[in-house]
Image: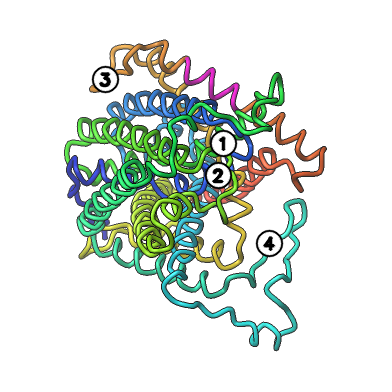
Amino acid sequence: MLNPPLKRALGLYATTALVIGSVVGSGIFSSPSTMARDLPSAPYLMGVWLLTGVLTLFGAFTQCELVGQMPKTGGLYEYFREVYGEGLGFLYGWANFMIAGSGAIAAISFFFAQYFENFTALPHFTHALTLIGVSEQTPWNIPLLGAIFPYQFLGRKLIASFLVIFLTALNVRGVKLGGTVQSISTTAKLLAILAIVVVAFIAGSHVGSAANWSRAGTAGSSLIGWPLIGAIALAMSGAFWSYDGWGNAAYIAGEVREPQKTIPKAIILGTLTFIGLYLVVNLAYFYILSVTGVANAPGDRVASQMIYAVVGSGGAGIIAAIMMLSAFDTTNSTVLTNARVYYAMARNGLFYRKSENVHKKFQTPHIALILQGAWSIILLVTGSFDLIVSMYVFVNWVLYALMAVAVFILRKRKPNTERPFSVPGYPWVPAIFVLFATAYVIITLVTDIQAYQAGTQPLIRSVTGMALVLTGLPFYYYWRWKRRGS
């Protein structure tokens, strides 16, 4: 019996909410702290946020042209398959399943559980661990990768797993339901974040100073030459992690009304919104805490430290609730969008075949959603998501560079094809994006090698990330062989 079609139930507001929700998650509340340690200079850091925002917008413009030409469920997987062949398309989807999508779901749901612990004590299962002869600090050593700690924070992992299960079940029940929840939670999240920024600037005038925006820490003042370039590259990794997810809306093109018009509008509106939001939020951080205070925020909880400096301990519960709302929102958008990649792969015979099944009643790719949830929970419970996510930004920017090159290839290959959306400033905008992405990838690789040689990293993360992606090749050949046989 043929699968029923996916239901076109999402309009502009819900799709824009998915763009914003996929991006504005835990990154903006924790990345500024690590970035300030890597690059202890407020002016440089604001420059990094602005530069990465502009480059993200260039990437968004570039992807919008591809969406207009190929409004297919699966997004970049389908674009790569069309332009470069199904092998590279598969590796993109495999990277999404193994590292990017599932790793992000695990990481952000764990962030939710961290703040959930502010409201109630969570069990550590210390006695049960002692009975089996281990402790929270007992590692599992993975050859060539390093150590993971599956017994740590078991209470948090339990709460995070419940969140993944709940949101997976919610999205199985219908894309419209998932989109409605997304619209409500994203709107609430944006209003809440803007509220704490307003509180910081108005109520924090007694502790804040606009002079902090032009100040650098002691280490930042002495950075010159290659160390400065390396520090900027490290800081950009944190910013790109916070900005990532802007292209996820393209994954659900098959469930959006008038996708050739709606998705480009949603991507651009959403991208402009979160760029502006991030700049304002960072100005608030530096205004209240200074770059040194941001770098030294306990547990990298910059927003919590900022509100504590303004109103004291009374604001802790409010911040924890906002963090949980943000993590809930981003986890939902990531669950909803990424599963469509595996559904598209399965339709082409390049993934577990039943993942192409569409629920007869709810018209959702329920098997793909369940598989995604299961793998995310495995990454979550084992603690391996922390290791995997650290390799993610490098891999993603290799793929983003290929995405932008695809625009040039399609312009040459199909010059007369109708383009509902054309990249503004073509060919300069995609060319700048490609050049920067290439430079960023090279600098990140060099910095990773140097960190490994200096003993500050247990492995070359960028190379290991690419190696993990290439583990998909045996699966690709197996599924292709199986498809040929059937």
Residue behind mark 1: 237
Residue behind mark 4: 148
C-alpha distance separating marks 4 and 2: 30 Å
C-alpha distance separating marks 4 and 1: 22 Å
Residues packed near mark 1 inside 10 Å, few (<14), some (14 to 19) or many (20 plus): many
The local secondary structure at tag 4 comes to strand
Q: Residue at x 46, y 28 (%)?
A: 403
C-alpha distance separating marks 4 and 3: 47 Å
C-alpha distance separating marks 2 and 1: 20 Å
The local secondary structure at tag 2 comes to helix
Picture coordinates of residue 300 (x, y %)? 55, 51
Picture coordinates of residue 134 (x, y %)? 73, 79
Q: Magenta region: which residues?
A: 432-440
- In front of the other: 31 or 419: 31
Q: Which residue is drawn at 61% across and 66% down?
A: 382
- The disc labelled 1 sits on which kind of residue? Ser
Mark sitting earlier along the chain (3/1)? 1
Identify the mark at residue 419; answer none if there is no mark: 3
Mark sitting earlier along the chain (2/3)? 2
Residues packed near mark 4 inside 10 Å, few (<14), some (14 to 19) or many (20 plus): some
Residue behind mark 2: 293
Please determine whether, in this image, residue 253 is positioned above or below residue 426: below
Please determine whether, in this image, residue 462 is positioned above or below residue 351: above
